[in-house]
Amino acid sequence: MNRREALFSLGSMAAAGGLASRAGAAELKGFPKQTAMSADHLPTPARSGGGFQVLKSETDQKTVKAVFDRLIPADDFGPSASEAGCLEFLDDQLSGDYGAGKALYLEAPLSPENEEEIMGAPQFLSTPRERYETGLKALEAYAQDTDGAAFHALSPDRIDEILTGLEAGEIDLGEGVNGQAFFELMLQNAREGYLADPLYGGNRDMAGWKMIGFPGARYDYRPYVDRRNEDLGLTPVSLIPND
Amino acid sequence: MANERPKADVVIVGLGWAGSVMAEELTRAGLNVVAIERGAWRDTSTDFPPAVDPDELRWHTRRELLQPMSVETTTFRNKTGQQAAPVRNWNAFQFGWNVGGAGTHWAGMSWRFLPWDFQVATQTAERYGQERLDSLMAEGLQLQDWGVTYDEMAPYYDRFERIAGTSGKAGNLNGQKIKGGNVFEGPRDREYPTPQLKDTNWMSMYRDTTEGMGYNPFTIPAGNISQAYVNPLGVTMGPCTYCGFCDFHGCGNFSKSSPQACILPALMRRSNFTVLTETEVLHAVKHEDGKTVKGVKFVTRDGEEGFQPADVVCITAYQMDNVRLMLLSGIGEQYDPATQQGTIGRNYSYQTCSSVTGFFSGAKMNPFIGGGALGVQIDDFNGDNFDHSELDFIGGAGIMGYSTNGRPIANMNGIRPGNKRWGSEWKEAYARDYQEVANIFCQGTSMPTRDAYLSLDPTYTDRHGQPLLRLTFDWNRNDTSMIDYTTKKAVEIMREAGGEDIMVDNQAEASWNPYKQHSSHTIGGLVMGSNPATSALNPYLQSWDCHNVFSVGASAFPNNGGYNPTLTVGALAVRAARAIHETYINNPGPLVEA
């Protein structure tokens, strides 16, 4: 096909289609479907505003804040968990697929002792959302029982003592709640919120990344790979704008 | 059958590395190929461009590129007699969940196995005497050769390296040993497609230290391309940027070897290739005589069942599912550990590993500069590269100093021993140790035993109501002795490098369970070999029981080398595909007489 023929064939295609606008412009609104991001791989930023979706009870919010801010307190190394947005992070995570345990195998039967022995860790049929709902209530009941006060009203030292006991598996939170596993779940989520991209509501001002010197969502270190034992002084970058 | 599709020459079950390589070979030979993949279509620009790829929470912590347990999981127990439990949460296994399979989210370590790995039984007897082999077998090891040698595999390794775009430095060119490469590797015909990657701070320390100790350090061969490259299919790759978001992530730079980056751009343009996505093969369907299959039964995302007839069925899912599909299809006989009869599920093995962590006061390791396959290794204690005459084990481990990532959530427990994981104590420790920590990994061989095997679970089922696969496995004495020995070598290296507060995580010191392990390298269960009594597949990856069924994956390895499995899987895929289009199609029948 020579150039002249090619031009002819293009012209006849347009005529046959009858779609060409009078001006001949290719008009686009929105991203062409074929090249758009796959819907389920688009980033899902944390909801902002509108209040908590899962941690609706005020007591639950206060309990989880009391725990998170002892797991990550404010100090010379950075803000506390709640100051860095870790409660918003947690609520948002629990309101989505993670909270619903969408990836987990939750088919019965579950024989807790056998599964814990074989797996070296307890397994559950409940979702993370359900485990927070029961776990936070059990913590509050434990504080009322032992101290006659709300969990969030306990002193920092007393909260540390309870958390240490949970971590060591020495505190029983009652039927249906594995205190040690619940401690691990909270510790995991609090630190996730502190260290994940600010896109998800935590790590506000990239405080967690600044604490350790992680430069974030940079995507090219070729200029730096040959440098040895140097503070590279890289400002962190997030997947969302800084301002 | 309702919803029966037009017949294909070949149906590919699972479009990961093995499936893509086979589909490329077979369509280029003119065959009409239909692939069936239960994951969705995923591609670089639409699913993991730089705008979303550097996101640890999503891809590494929540593992969104991996197959969820709610789709299918494995049940597990250490020994027969125990009630197996389903693995309910994320664990060591990392199965693929998209077109490209695990080849999309893998790390990229691109090893050829050692010549010894293919002939453990023969070479152990030759070097240490038949008595030594007999005593290992009497102890419960189930050692057997692969039915293919390294020399026979070399051309297929070469082909896969060219397609995948492996970077590295040769250590054995046609028998000539070259310092700086891996002098223990089997001979290769030519250099790697692109040069080795650069050293990070820790890698250069590890290289200098091990060289000073008289070892032979080299850069790990990587499916992270080191410079511009066009592969034999005409696909251009982009250089690795050391971004540190590699394993568990896709690659937004076209730098990591994957079906998306290396094969699909060519394959998808061929008119004799079709892929059905979000469609799961339930099992193959046998002809009345039971000697061949007529195709595969599948179910779509919407729950509609269908049938894909084909002359040849290639089962190229992940290792576990290859075994499971054979059992669900009734092809071959289930292995029984009591009698050692049956071959399906036999010779399951794993990867025997340990980590050694050290801290370097005042250092700036800049661990965020990383790549999935970025590391320096010594093979002085791998395979049979060292004398085992006075040792109470066979096998060994590659010992690597690596710089794969500095992802902050993944590394948050990488703090000096004795520090709490929470409170101001944790913050102070992590603020300091993030830059001061360095790791050595021992990636060791695993030998099969009589007792370790795969079978269908009697209790638990997947979302379609089909039985889950049950794994019965624990460490064996040989492999724990091996990893004890090599871990001590790694500790010596860490000490010599100047690492302090050294921590050792020997994964084989307690009973195996999938939550404690770090390796996704799960091996065997559908092994190749020259004896139909002890192998499910012949040396061309063809089923001894149904001659138009071929299966490629790490499921075919009778034992595991001290290496990542992918390059060997890719090479076996080339070998099997060539056997199909060069020989089998024109003369269907067993390629090897039983």
Image (cartoon, grey):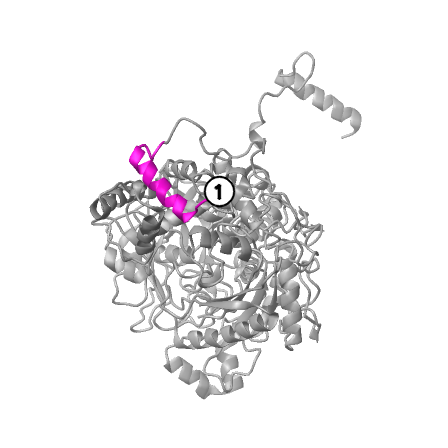
Is residue B435 placed above or below A7 in the rendered structure?
Answer: below
Determine crowd level at label 1: few under 14, some 14-19, many 20+ residues with C-alpha closer than 10 A.
Answer: many
Specify the farthest residue to the top. A22
Q: How many labels does the image show?
A: 1
Q: In which quarter of the image is the C terminus of chain A?
A: top right
Q: Which chain carries label 1?
A: A
Quick check: B501 above or below B51?
below
Residue drawn where x is 22% and y is 48% of the image: A146
* Magenta segment: A53-74
Residue B312 visible to the viewer: no
**Side (left or right) of A17 relative to B476:** right
Residue under numbered circle 1: A79
Q: In which quarter of the image is residue A50?
A: top left
Q: Main secondary structure of the magenta part?
A: helix
Q: Which amino acid does label 1 sit on?
A: Pro
Assign a secondary structure to mark 1.
loop
Q: Quadrant of the N terminus of chain A?
A: top right
Question: Residue drawn at (49%, 48%), measured in percent from left and top?
Answer: B60
